[in-house]
Image: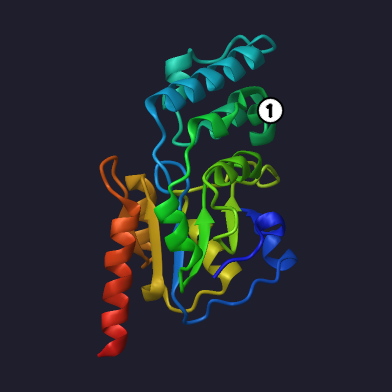
Amino acid sequence: MSTNLINNFISMNTENLEKHSINPVNDDYIFLFDIDDTLYKRSEKMKMVEKQKFKEAYNHFKLQKPDVPEWEKFLDEKILYAESFRIHFNKTCLEVEKIRACDYKKFITEDKELKNYLKNFQYRSWCFTNGLRCRAEPILEGLNLSDVFEGVICMDDNFSSGSVRGKPQEEMYKFVEDLLKIKNKNKVFFFDDSLDNIETGRKMGWNCYLIDKEDNLLDKLKIIVSEIQSDMER
């Protein structure tokens, strides 16, 4: 099941629960996918370049506020880098992204087998990422997966609550449930490369699958779908 993504990037802000009218999942199956290192594997070069870009943003903002922790300590303070930028520089995710953005597409290649499988996927599917739209959109385009998901639930750039919202915060999983109007958590299947994110999903009662460096997402998907179909035939 797929639609045009152009109007279906929804940021993790509770105000958006009233703004968007999504076809309710109710008791249907729903598949939720992280993007980075789940739908594709980032190369070591891409990881290195992205870390360099974060450091460029750090150095840029440090010119105005030099009394911040040193770079390595700055990185280790929070699970979400964006939270450290907010705390020490009072900068939004978007302000940081504008400084650190790079040409993601040059690091990405399409997985045609995965594309074909998801294009013909019989279950509802969304992306659930800690990236902003300005990052998630070009990456999905580079993967040629822009037309296989109903939408993308992504990082919010509105800090009205005073904090950065994202996985693995439980309230963001609750946001997903409320947005999609999920009634049966046993029919939620969530894929992510972060153990912290997976553990929160399990705590919420979702079916969660850790995608390690050596794991093949498509292989796991085929096994899970086969098990679902077998259960339905009993």
The secondary element bearing badge 1 is classed as: helix
Report whether residue 199 is seen.
no
In this picture, residue 188 sits left or right of residue 144:
left
Q: Quadrant of the N terminus?
A: bottom right
* Looking at the image, residue 208 lies above or below residue 227: above
Left or right: residue 58 versus residue 170 is: right
Query: Is residue 4 visible to us here?
Result: yes
Q: Residue at x 48, y 47 (%)?
A: 35
Quick check: 168 above or below 73?
Answer: below
Residue 190: image location, x then y, percent = 40, 60
| Mark 1 nearby-residue class (10 Å; few <14, some 14–19, many ≥20) | few
Q: Nearer the viewer, residue 139 or 185?
A: 139
In the image, farthest residue toward the right: 19
**Residue bearing mark 1:** 98
Number of numbered discs overlaid on the protein picture: 1
Q: How is the image coloured?
A: rainbow
The residue under the point 61% across, 31% down is 86
Q: Give percent across and percent down for residue 88.
A: 60, 23
The image position of residue 32, as x and y in percent, is: 46, 60
At label 1, the amino acid type is Lys
Residue drawn where x is 54% and y is 60% of the image:
148
Question: Could you say which is closer to the camera, residue 33 or residue 166?
Answer: 33
Corner quadrant of residue 93: top right
Residue that appears at 44% across and 65% down: 31
Question: Which of the two residues, 156 or 124, is positioned nearer the viewer here?
Answer: 124
Q: Nearer the viewer, residue 123 or 200?
A: 123
Q: Quadrant of residue 214?
A: top left
Whether residue 116 is situated above or below residue 132 in the rendered picture: below
Q: Residue furthest bottom?
A: 234
Where, quadrant-wise, is the C terminus in this rendering? bottom left
